[in-house]
Image (cartoon, helix red, strand yellow):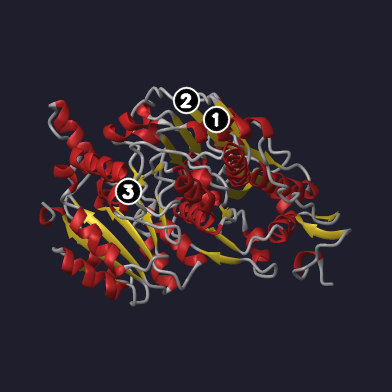
Amino acid sequence: MGSPRTAPHGRYGPEAAMTGGEALVRALAAHGARTAFGIPGTHNLEVYRHLGPYGITHVTPRHEQGAGYAADAYARVTGRPGIAVTTTGPALLNIAAAAGQAYSDSVPLLIVSPGMPLRHPRQPTGMLHEMRSQTEALRGVAAFSHRVSTVEETGAAVARAFTLFRTERPRPVHIEVPLDLLEAAERVGGVRLAPPSAGRRPGAEPVREAAAALLAARRPALVLGGGSRGAAADCGALAGELGAWVVTTANGKGIVDESHPLSLGVSLHSPSVQKALTDCDVVLAVGTELAESDLWSAPPALAGTLIRVDVDPAQMYAGLPADVALVGDARDALRALREAVAVQRSESRGDTVALGNGPDGVAALRGERDAETAERDARWIPYLRAIRGVLDEDAVITSDSAQCCYYGALPHLPVGPRGRYLHPTGFGTLGYALPAAIGVKSAYPGRQVVALSGDGGLQFTVQELATATQLGLPLPVVVFDNGGYGEIRDEMNARGDTPTAVDLPRVDLPALCRAYGGAGTHADSPGALAEALARALNTPGPTVITVPEESTV
């Protein structure tokens, strides 16, 4: 069987002697982990020792924040928790921003790290990477931070994390294994596994009430957030059955095909769309907080009935309180709701008549929405059309907190259910796009993946070009370069302030990518961007394509 420190993978049975590091990796593998992102350090070598034997591949970003964003995106596209491994102290703090983003966007991210020894004194000793409390630091951005006290408890901590991922609103979790437990060999029992999800169907009575309200509605609408992704087919079918128009949050982008005649895409921030929502007699909101980060303003006062579907009971009274609360998994809830609608329609022998919310009404509302920002958004639209024209339907686009993304691509680059668009909503971090694209590419090497960013945001994590080069997989990085922090510059101008600290010297980003071993070029027209993007999708490694914003105006 081998010594406790070199036990072969697959040892999941009872009464095995192993270190805390092996117990941790064994538990991750038993829960289906196959990829981890992280950087080895002096204190986590016992974890790295066991990754390969337990069948877990590893991707090495150049910064722990990049590891967190990559694991976050891996989780979003695969539906499996993303695993990130850090060492102690500064490494763990480096990944805290990514944990905050995962918390904001309800992403199952598992961060594992060493910690100070079990009996480490509270008085500082000057030990390497020592800090007052890693668990207290991570509790502020995670669902929980679990510091284990025995090797046996390590497996239970992993099971606790996966139980949360499967049964509650997904959030990031941190598990800390003290240094002495990582290296100490103890006899432990078999792997403790999180129970499988049994589904969470809402109560029958609120389902009947919601179905009755929807059938009686003359102007129904669906608002879809990221929590509705597992119910995409039922959401689209219900919208068609009711003649209801559909609007999504950033995280819900593409759940219903944005080319569908009833779809308004990502438009919750539009004053016209918000006004239309207040005129609806029933709004069905699925898997969304209906928060300021979704609406870019305070939630509008809805005049009609608000039906909310969410796995998190707290959402039923947070923000806009639900008139009808369906607490449960979106897939189970939407199927139950469609069944109830069919039964009640059959019993009443009636048809739903949606006035003003059919395809003609949606087309008119889409026109009002676009007119609101036509002057501002015109600079990006031709380039976004060029990008869309090159990409496959199942391509994945990763996004940054950049004007070209939230003003440009979110409302104007259509995505369907086969594709994905990953955006850092809520927490609003910068530097997400490039490492997130690496996370997606690690999960699906053969799938088209494009990172879309601004010059300011890209430079938060630009070192991950080295990671992308090492992977050797085609990865275009399209950068709209406005010479600094364009959004903050505009906000300063709007206040009448003198722009300060927002104009940055231009960096030759394509040359920087070439220095990292990739490729790079500039594109000063939509046609040039389309040609460069097509080449980049067939060129191993990253290709940075910059679009100077003076060429877009």
Q: Secondary structure at mark 2?
A: loop
Closer to the camera in the image, 174 or 359: 359
Q: Give the image location of residue 197, x and y in percent.
A: 71, 48
Corner quadrant of residue 56: bottom right
Q: Where does label 2 land, which residue?
A: 319
Q: Which mark is residue 326?
A: none
| Element class at badge 3 | helix
- x, y percent for residue 50: 68, 65
Report the residue marked by disc 1. 315
Up/down of 483 relative to 59, above or below: above
In the displayed structure, 476 sits above or below 491; it is below
Q: Position of residue 547 (x, y in %)?
A: 19, 59
Q: Quarter of the image holding residue 51?
A: bottom right
Q: Earlier in the sequence, mark 1 or mark 3?
A: 1
Left or right: 42 with respect to 470?
right
Looking at the rendered structure, which numbered label has been put on residue 410? Answer: 3
Q: Please identify the quadrant where the N terminus is shown.
A: bottom right
Distance CA(mark 1)–CA(mark 3): 24 Å
| Residue 124 in sight here | no
Tag 1–tag 3 contact (CB < 8 Å): no
N-term mark: 2 or 3: 2
